[in-house]
Amino acid sequence: MPKITPNLWFDTQGKEAAEFYCSVFPNSRIKEVTHYNEAGPRPAGTVLTVVFELDGQEYLAINGGPEFTFSEAISLMITCADQDEIDYYWAKLSEGGEEGPCGWLKDRYGLSWQVAPDGMAELLNDPDQDRAARAMKAMFGMKKIDIAALRAAADAG
């Protein structure tokens, strides 16, 4: 089976973004950097691509120019074991970016992330439809997900 590597398009900040992401996630590293050469279209020596790995998942950052920017149409999901992990990733990734609703944020480079607890789908799909509705209503009122508040809302019936 072929390997699938998400390719993230940046204007000029691909290496800076890759270094930032590697500093946030454990077991991460820059694997390879390529540069534009005399063929252009950017000055020779300018970073073209950066292959990096975030905890075993490979990504490629390309400095392709300002023609394309990120949108919420694609995001990276982080499934967190507990509130401490949610708090950590939310703080690191939202710094210099912007917080969105329901556990979504945009980082300083405009890339969207979802920071959610493990087991969230089970709570929102609870067989007790009233419990699931209370949890979902609580989630819609949150920016960063608060697991205790989500569970308290679900159990409030």
Image: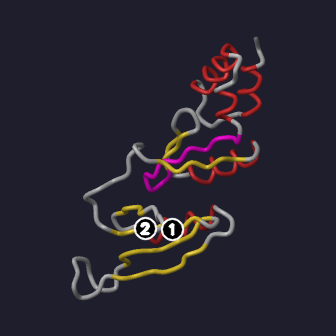
Does the magenta-highlighted stretch encompass residue 23? no
Percent across and percent down for residue 40 are 23, 81
Frontmost of labels 2 and 1 is 2
Q: Is residue 150 above or below residue 36?
A: above
Percent across and percent down for residue 16 are 48, 69
Q: Amino acid at mark 2?
A: Ala
Q: Assign a secondary structure to mark 2.
A: strand
- Specify the color scheme: secondary structure
Q: Quadrant of the C terminus?
A: top right
Q: Residue at x 61, y 49 (%)?
A: 78
Q: Which residues are magenta?
A: 107-118
Q: Is residue 78 above or below residue 12?
A: above
Q: Residues within 10 Å of mark 2 (few under 14, many from 20)?
A: many
Q: Which residue is mark 1?
A: 18
Q: Are the residues flagged by discs 2 and 1 in contact, CB closer than 8 Å?
A: yes
Q: Residue at x 71, y 27 (%)?
A: 150
Q: Residue at x 67, y 13 (%)?
A: 130
Q: Which residue is mark 2?
A: 61
Compare marks 2 and 1 and give the one earlier in the sequence: 1
